[in-house]
Image (cartoon, grey):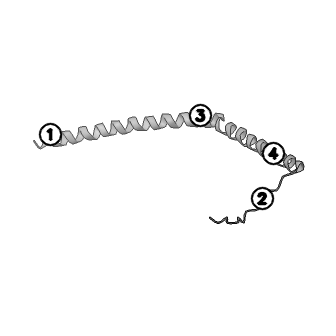
């Protein structure tokens, strides 16, 4: 069994200054992400967005009812047409 040397260098020890800088960078990234989340939630729960969602859902339900009624009328008229020729 042979020992194969690796080309991966050993990790160098990081100094305290590098850790402090990294910590500051991570805190800044967290603050940026928090601001994005706050902005997104405000945008999502605006009054215009909620009302447009409600009206769109009502409109979809009305379209379903309208489609059902039109389908019923078409079937009824086809039945009347078929009954004429019997």
Helix, strand or loop status at disc 3 = helix
Q: Nearer the viewer, mark 4 or mark 3?
A: 4
Residue 79 picture location, percent across and down: 20, 39
**Residue neighbourhood size for the residue with mark 2, other residues' Cα within 10 Å, grouped as few (<14), some (14–19), many (≥20):** few
* Residue 28's disc number: 4
Helix, strand or loop status at disc 2 = loop
Task: Give the residue at mark 1.
Answer: 83
Disc 4 from disc 3: Cα separation: 35 Å
Q: Nearer the viewer, mark 1 or mark 3?
A: 3
Task: Give the residue at mark 3.
Answer: 51
Say which residue appears at 22% left-offset and 42% top-offset: 78
- Dot 1 and dot 4 residues touching (CB under 8 Å): no
Helix, strand or loop status at disc 1 = helix
| Chain-order first, disc 3 or disc 2 | 2
Task: Identify which residue, 79 or 20, lies in the foreground.
Answer: 20
Task: Give the residue at mark 2.
Answer: 10
- Dot 2 and dot 1 residues touching (CB under 8 Å): no
* Residue 67's disc number: none
| Chain-order first, disc 1 or disc 3 | 3
Disc 3 from disc 2: Cα separation: 60 Å
Q: Nearer the viewer, mark 3 or mark 2?
A: 2
């Amino acid at each position: 069994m042979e020992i194969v040397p690796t080309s991966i260098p050993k990790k160098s020890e990081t100094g305290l200054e590098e850790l402090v800088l990294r910590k500051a960078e991570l805190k800044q990234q967290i603050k940026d992400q928090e601001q994005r989340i706050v902005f997104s939630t405000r945008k999502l729960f605006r009054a215009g967005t909620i009302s447009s969602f409600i009206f769109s859902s009502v409109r979809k339900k009305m379209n379903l009812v309208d489609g059902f009624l039109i389908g019923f009328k078409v079937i009824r008229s086809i039945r009347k047409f078929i009954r004429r020729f019997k």
